[in-house]
Amino acid sequence: MHILLVASAFNSLTQRVLAELQDRGHTAGIVLALGDDEALREAVRQHAPALVIAPMLTTAIPEDVWRAHTCLIVHPGPPGDRGPSSLDRTLQGGVDSWGVTVLEAVAEMDAGDVWAWSPLKVPPQAGKSDLYRGEVADAAVDAVLLAVERFASGTYKPKRQKAADLAAGWRPFMKQAERRIDWATQTTESVLQHLRAADSQPGVLDELRGASWYLHGGHAEDELRGAPGELIATRAGAVCRATVDGAVWLTQLRPWREPGSGLPSYKLPAVEALGARLPAGLPEVPAPLELPAGRRTWSDIRYREHGPVGVLNFSFAGGAMSTAQCRRLLAAYRFACTRPTSVLVLGGLRDFFSNGIHLNVIEAASDPAEESWANIHAMNDLVEAVLTTTDRLTVAALGGNAAAGGVMLALAADEVWCRDGVVLNPHYKLMGLHGSEYWTYSLPRRVGADEAARLTQSALPVSAKRAVALGLAQRVLQAAPEELGDEVGRLAAQLAASPDLAARLADKQAARAHDEAAKPLQAYRDEELAHMRRNFFDPAEPHAALRSAFVRKEKAQHTPAHLAALGLPR
Ligand code: COA
């Protein structure tokens, strides 16, 4: 079937729906709904789709379009739920099960007939965007695929929603007033519900150290204590803030700006955002890499060991890895390599694996080109350490998506395992970068030179299943986001116990020695960095403007050409 996707942005769910439809043999086109109804109509005319699907749409589809074509809308709520802040209200309300519905577009928002829906379990600790990219995306894909099947049958009659239910189900947009945290009275659990309901967008607006900020992140702390609302510690760029009965970690802050001030407002690690406003003498409380069982605190890097298997978990907001984060992860990786294990797993947590260098931290630096340079070196040092580990097998376990240098970090491992539903974006082109992280070595080695060129030039997402078919990944893991860790542990233990482990290690050592003799890793790095230097430092290069637009979340003006061409005859 030829399906046209209409979306407000080519976001994670839209990418995943596209990839999953293609995996099942459908062809699909994309048009971004950016307020120009004529452009949308033109795309519909060009594609003449059998079906229109809107995986993530914040505006209405024009009436003439939904009257002429069946248009299916994905709503992140079960049948009967309506409104633009569904997940926010659900998380702030603290429910443990939810759903996603696919319904037909009609004049009234979320009021059309129901084609399919899928239930989901709300995990206890995830923030809204994490939930959206995990359980919600899984349920949305199930419901979309069922709806497509039902539509294709030609006989399915979607279920009408009753007028009384429609009136009862409407829940309005959630304003900051409802998100407000009262630090003098709210418990840690209640504060966390507010923070998670607003994470990663829009954050909770609050006062802190004499300025207004949107608070991001939200993780419980079980030991540190202080006066409610006060900052009491820092750790790895995050700040710890006391509540009435405990404390929470805030990982990022975004400054509030007077509307129309023209001042930029984007997220930064909390310590960096506060800068001179940080109270003097605030203790930096490092988290032990191996956290004792039973502790409830936040850290972005952890190491665990089960017999011959080491697991290096890491989780960075938005998958972005700053110079400091890369260096800390490299130190942890080096520690893990001193341990007597035969399999070392990197990742293994839900949500983003990595999206490469930290564009926000770079943008905020006094010299962004120099900071880009430091960041890419730090990232390359990490990737090199993985590539040159020859005394044990390494596995990159992706619970969530990866892009650009984050994909190449995964490819440095011997095996790449992706949770079903993961989307990879193995390209740098949209950010105006040649790319580094030894991709010119890793990518062709896995998929061949022609496919490597196609992947990097087409700049399109790749599903987990297709990644395995291409040779980018070795395994698709059938596990819910919350169950990924256990599944990875089980498979890693099997790998460590496999009788051919010694032979595989010997092969790996020989292959690395052979490749190094043919062309040293340093030569790949030097060649890539010669391009990257120009990308970062030459004012005529497009990267700085692309980075700035990305960080500031500037809306696209039209559907990018590489997406507009998708699904149309060449
Ligand atoms: N640096 C800083 N922040 C990043 C980032 C990066 N490299 N990659 C993603 N993020 C942030 C986004 O700003 C966004 O923040 P928010 O939660 O505050 O809105 C969040 O991570 C999720 O990204 P988003 O773009 O909304 O998700 P998506 O699923 O629609 O798209 C990507 C995912 C990876 C395709 C897109 O984020 C991207 O192109 N990132 C840049 C990749 C890159 O070029 N890296 C540098 C070269 S190595």
Image: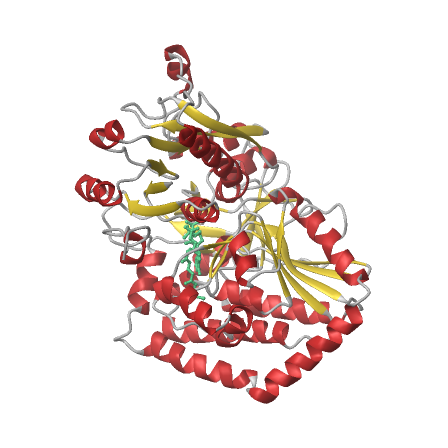
Q: Nearer the viewer, residue 467 or 224?
A: 467
**Above or below, comparing residue 52 to residue 264 in the picture:** above
Image quadrant for the N terminus?
top left
| Residue 187 in view here | no
Report which quarter residue 57 is drawn in. Answer: top left
| Residue 470 in view here | yes
Ligand 1 location (quadrant) = bottom left
| Residue name at image x 48 percent, y 66 percent | 405
Side of 262 relative to 504 (left or right) = left
**Above or below, comparing residue 393 to residue 532 in the picture:** above
Side of 141 relative to 36 (left or right) = right
Residue 152 in the image, given as x and y percentages of width and height: 41, 32
Quick one: which residue is furthest to the bottom in this view?
517
Report which quarter residue 522 is drawn in. Answer: bottom right
Q: Nearer the viewer, residue 120 or 337?
A: 120
Residue 288 in the image, given as x and y percentages of width and height: 70, 59
Residue 320 in the image, given as x and y percentages of width and height: 48, 59
Quick one: which residue is furthest to the left in this view?
38
Residue 262 in the image, given as x and y percentages of width and height: 24, 53
Side of 531 relative to 391 (left or right) = left
Q: How many marks?
A: 0
Image quadrant for the C terminus?
bottom left
